[in-house]
Structure formats: C-alpha cells, structure tokens
Image (spheres, rainbow, N blue to C red):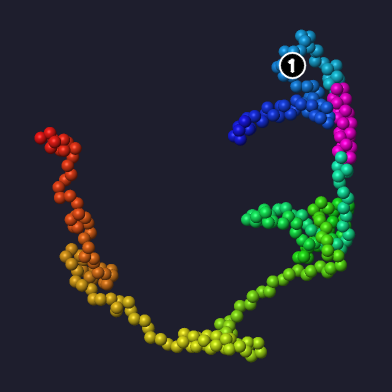
Amino acid sequence: MSHTDWDLKLPYFLWAYRATPHSTTGYSPFFLLHGREVVTPANENLRPKVPKPTRGPKLIESLKASLRQAYSAVARANRKSYVANKERYDKRAKLRSFEVGSYVYLFKPARKPGLSKKIFSVCSGRYRVTAKLSELNYEILGQSGRKYVVHLRRLKACHGTAGSDYPPAAKWPRRSRQKRDTMFRPDTETDTCPTAILAYQLASDKTLADDSPSTPPASPLASRPATSPPSAGEPDTAERKDPTFLPSDTPRSNRELAIGRSTPPVTRSQTRDNFSE
C-alpha cells in the first residue's frame, strides 16, 4: 500500500475492524448492529449442510432476544472497564490546587509562524490567581489586565513570588514629532552644552541660505554645441523632434563595415566536384 491508493484499501480495513470482537465488550460491531456475525465465503463452505430456518415471527423474536442479551453484556463490560481504568489512572494522578492570590505560569504550546521551536517557551506569565471557580477551573489575571478562565492542567506554580506585588502593565512612551524651527533650538535649562548651540547655529544658517534668492540654473541646451548640418539621406533639422540630436558616424550594418564574405560559400557538391577534377 502506498500513499496514493489508500482510499482503495480503506474498505478492507473497515471490514476487518467491524468483524473483529472488541476487547471490552466481547462482541464485534457488526454483531451489535445486525444481531449476527459476518458471513464470509470461507465460513459458508465450512458450515454443515442443514436446512435454513424459515423467516417468520420466531426468527425475529430470537434476533431481539440475542440483541437484548448482547446489549446488557456490553453495558456490564463497559462499567467494569471504566472502574479498572479509573483505578489505574488514580495511582499516578496527583491532586493539585492553587490559592487565591498566588502566581502561576500558563501553558501555551502554540507559537507564531517564524519562531524557532528550540528556544520557544511553552509557558508564559506570570499570572495571578483571582478566583477558584471549581476543583478544575481557575480564573487568572494577566499583566495586561485581562482575565482568563483556564483548566488546572494548564497551570504551573510560580515559586519565589510570595508576598510580592503584581507588576503594572508596561506602557511604551509615544514619540512626539518636533517642528523644524525647534528641532535644534537649545534649551537654556537643560541644553547648555556647546554642541547643541553649534547645531542650532548651523541649522539657522542653512535655513537662511535656502530662503535667499539664487540665480536660475543655466539651460542644458546652452551648454550643448551647435548642431552640424544634416548629412545626405537625413531629414532637415526643422523636421526633427530634438534639434540637439547629432547623428553617429558609425556604419549601421555589416555590409557598410565590410565584414563578411566577398564570395558566396562553397557547398558540399562544389567541394566534391573540385576534388574530382
């Protein structure tokens, strides 16, 4: 079986599961649903040749009686299995509880995409227990001021914090934008260093230089040389879109450059004729 044809093999696995007796109930799922076991070709060949019972009220009553007996046996087996599983679990289970006001860690295994699993911490916190809702559910308070109701299995005691106050939520200071005229202005009470005063003077000089009138830049056409008269085969300057365009003196094709064969290439038939002569 491969990973591409599993859907074709799935009916065979389901048939084997439904025809196998369960370890707890002692009956197969097929028997509990239909009141009889699965009839396979091998079982049909091994059966003794006896006349089949006629279908009637007696067959229906016997089927109901067998199903009723099987259901009662399954109920007793389930209760017995439940008691055995509970005893096995209680041998290793430990009862835990947290007092109101104590600090705990919260188990949060989910991580955001891009974070490494090796250095990711599955426990976050710390949180403070604010209320005990039941033996298994607690209400905790986070550092952001938000409350959560979580299960006991997601909590872990935080030691060494008894009697400490809960830290307030951290607030990042907002950066305020300063105006251009007050960016480098020194404060007489705080900024008395020469560096701040020098920076303010340089900024003031730069502002005055920007505000002063300046000569307009020279036109780029003035620095270009005068255009030469058009060569033969080229349109007049008045018909051009760019009057400063200067044509290139480089030939435009290999024929003008005289690159190539002066005679056509010799074919195979001509070479063969030359050798025969």
Residue 17 visible at all: yes
In the rendered image, the vertical position of residue 206 relative to residue 164, given as above or below: below
The N terminus sits in image quarter: top right
**Numbered range of the magenta stretch:** 65-87
Q: What is the x, y in percent for residue 78? A: 86, 33
Q: In front here: 192 or 276? A: 276
Q: Residue at x 84, y 68 (%)?
A: 164
- Horizontal and vertical percent for residue 206? 49, 85
Which residue is depicted at the point 63% across and 56% down?
A: 114
Q: Position of residue 13 (x, y in %)?
A: 69, 29
| Residue on which the image places disc 1 | 43
Residue 255 colored magenta?
A: no
Majority SS type along the magenta span: helix
Residue 209 vs 102, above or below: the answer is below
Query: Residue 234 versus residue 124: which sits nearer the camera?
Result: 124
**Which residue shows up at 57% across the image and 84% down it?**
184
Q: Is residue 232 above or below residue 58?
A: below
Question: Circle 1 — which element?
Answer: helix
Left or right of 126, for residue 249: left
Placement of the C terminus among the 4 image quadrants = top left
Residue 75 visible in the picture = no
Front-most of residues 230 and 186: 186
Residue 176 falls left or right of residue 134 = left
